[in-house]
Amino acid sequence: MGRGKVELKRIEDKSSRQVSFSKRRNGLMKKTHELAVLCDVDVALFIFSGRGRLYEFSTGESMIKLLTRYQSYKKTEELTRISVHKQKLDSENVCSADELTQILKWHLEENNIQLLDTTGLNQLEQQLDSLLQQVRIRKTQQMMEVVKALQEEEMQLKKERNFMMEEIMAARSDGIDDDSGDPSQPQRPVMDAQIIW
Amino acid sequence: MGRGKVELKRIEDKSSRQVSFSKRRNGLMKKTHELAVLCDVDVALFIFSGRGRLYEFSTGESMIKLLTRYQSYKKTEELTRISVHKQKLDSENVCSADELTQILKWHLEENNIQLLDTTGLNQLEQQLDSLLQQVRIRKTQQMMEVVKALQEEEMQLKKERNFMMEEIMAARSDGIDDDSGDPSQPQRPVMDAQIIW
DNA sequence: AAACCTATATATAAAAC
DNA sequence: TGTTTTATATATAGGTT
């Protein structure tokens, strides 16, 4: 993309690496922005330069919100994932059943999500996960949506109930006539139905 | 960058927006990767498609680590207390770690495996795979139960509602000539919740 | 949708400033 | 170091299958 073709490997010359970084960083930001606008999606991009300087770009949604959304998405994923993780394990790196059991046990006993990203049974995990992950995520998300819908309806029903409860109370104390002139109803107690996952 | 020049604004045609998204997403990922390699920097990129699907890319440092780094860079405490909307499932988590470990151990020892070569790995993979399926099934069952519970509560609420509705009606007819004008009883919208699996 | 095809628009490496 | 220039490599819009 320039006078010379360039190998996909670290540019050793510090100077041209710096120049390249500057140019490409701008280009990347631009393209990221384009993607976001043209395709109407949310994106977040951040770059830590060698010296630890941070460059970032994100769509209207602030970076923090996108990160939160990301985390939330990941948590949902976690709902469908087992804590089988880590410890490099490939055909070269053979380990005994006991060893493996110990490793797995250790991981299974760890409920700390943060630890899931240390090196470990990556390869094994990926093999297992890639097979099932998508389906599980879909399934979970579907369920979550159903549950959410149910929660909303539940809330609605509860509100109705409270409303009617008041009507009954009012009817009883007022005698019997009531009604027709409901305009000045004070605030109604509203209960929030919350299901915690 | 194609046959036609394109305005920097949302592509309205859904189809070509989708196609463009796919192409540009890939291009962006590629360029992100190039930047990371050529310039030896850490980058993280994630994209939420319109339908909420997540696409992400990050350098060797896992996304989580980069996020952490970003956070500390920003010194924002916001992220540390992200909504954790699922205490329940976590605590009741499928089956206990010990239980899982036992099952796994059983699988491993049952087959008298000592060293895992490539073939052994494949076998282990299958075992874990079936284990994953079991766990998944249990999790599904659990969620189904939650849904069922919600549905039951919903039904209960509806019963209550109907009951109260009758009370209101009774109170009114008991009373006097009511106000008339009202063509129909204050009927609240009744929704039928149908969950289709 | 995905995969391939071109003509064009863009990005950018290297040179020149 | 950064900017501008230029020649070339890449990306991709719009087709086609």
Image (cartoon, coloured by chain):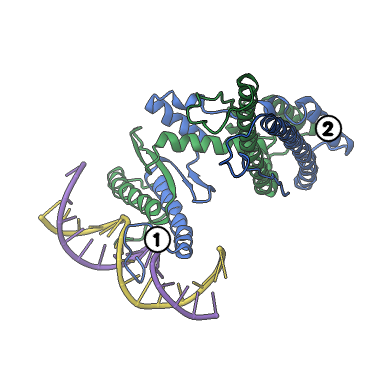
Chain colours: A green, B blue, C yellow, D purple
Left or right, residue B150 beside residue A185: right
Query: Looking at the picture, how far across and down is residue A101, in whole percent?
Result: 77, 30
Amino acid at pointer 1: Ile
Name the residue beneath numbered marker 2: B103
* Closer to us: D6 or B133: B133
Mark 1 neighbour density, 10 Å: few (under 14) some (14–19) many (20 or more): some
- State which quarter of the image contains the N terminus of chain B: bottom left
Residue B78 in view here: yes
Chain identity of mark 2: B
Side of C16 relative to B133 (left or right):
left
Q: A79 above or below A190?
A: below
Residue position for label 1: B11
Q: Are marks 2 and 1 in contact (CB under 8 Å)?
A: no
Q: Please tell me which residue is depicted at 63% across the width and 36% down the height of the picture.
A: A78
State the image coordinates of residue B7 (x, y, percent, origin top left): 31, 61
Marker count (numbered): 2
* Camera-side mark, 2 or 1: 1
The residues bearing labels 2 and 1 have C-alpha atoms spaced at a distance of 53 Å
Residue in front for this viewpoint, B115 or A144: A144
What chain does badge 1 belong to?
B
Secondary structure, mark 2, is helix
Residue sitting at 36 percent across and 68 percent down?
B2
Which corner quadrant of the image does residue A136 belong to?
top right
